[in-house]
Amino acid sequence: MSSWLYVGKLDNPSLVDPVAEFVRATDARPVSRGLSNPFFSRRARHAANDNLVKEWFGPEKPIASLCVFNLASIVLFLEHTAQLEGLASSNDAITQSRWANLPYWIDSVWLPITGQPKVKVQDIFGMPTFLGSTSGLLADLLEINNLSPMKLNSIPPQYDVMRRDPVAFFRQEAEILEEPDVLRWLWLALFDAATLANEYQVPVISA
């Protein structure tokens, strides 16, 4: 089963209340909306953020779809980041890592908000759904790239093909990548997705 990152609006109405509560609880600021001005009252920010949350939901198709292969590839990346922190495994990293915005959960949503709000795992119909921030994810990825010997910001083979036409890439015969290139692929897909989300003011969804 393949795994994807989707940059675009959320279409699950059961997430509306959890997302709104998350944004209000963290007193988060939307990226590039001018609401980080300290002269804005908390009430004004909350009202503006409530309106913004509504803009994050809709039936529109994603702006971008990025293939991240499968769950095994994601675990490989998380094992690498755990090793960078000196942790025994990615399971330990879920509760101990300082990089809280990594995709430890199958169902994850990163919202285009600034700063490092406290992440949250919300139970949605019995399934854990991670809520985090795109700015927090980008900050984590940049630190990971600086610490990793793998040159994670290097473009691996076939990545550009996937970005140009993800459907065609998915249908073609897959080229087997070496482990370092899988790590680079995951890092770059997460980085590109979060960057696009900030640019277009929409969430990133993993599925």
Image: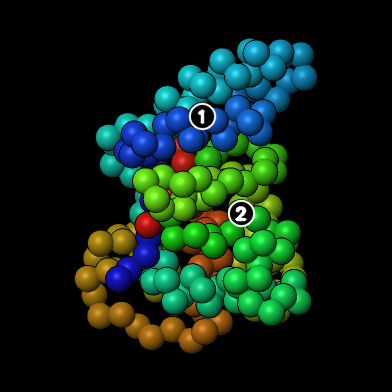
Q: Secondary structure at mark 2?
A: loop
For image coordinates 37% across by 65% down, the residue present is 3
Q: Amino acid at mark 2?
A: Asn
Q: Amino acid at mark 1?
A: Ala
Q: How is the image coloured?
A: rainbow
Residue bearing mark 2? 101
For image coordinates 44% across by 84% down, the residue present is 177
User: Is 196 or 131 nearer to us in this picture?
Assistant: 131
Considering only vertical position in the picture, is 90 above or below 55?
A: below
Considering only vertical position in the picture, is 129 above or below 22?
A: below
Q: Position of residue 115 (x, y in %)?
A: 70, 39
Q: Mark 2 or mark 1: name the one nearer the start of the chain.
A: 1
Can residue 81 be seen?
Answer: no
> What is the quadrant of residue 59 in the picture?
top left
User: Is 147 or 154 nearer to us in this picture?
Assistant: 147
Q: Taking 167 as reference, is 118 left or right?
A: right
Name the disc covering residue 186, or none: none
Q: Position of residue 183 (x, y in %)?
A: 54, 75
Q: Position of residue 2 (x, y in %)?
A: 32, 68
Residue bearing mark 1? 20
Sort mark 2 into few (<14), some (14-19) or many (20+) by Cα contacts within 10 Å: many
Sort mark 1 into few (<14), some (14-19) or many (20+) by Cα contacts within 10 Å: some
Q: Taking 198 as reference, is 63 left or right?
A: left
Considering only vertical position in the picture, is 188 above or below 80?
A: above
> What is the quadrant of residue 141 in the picture?
bottom right
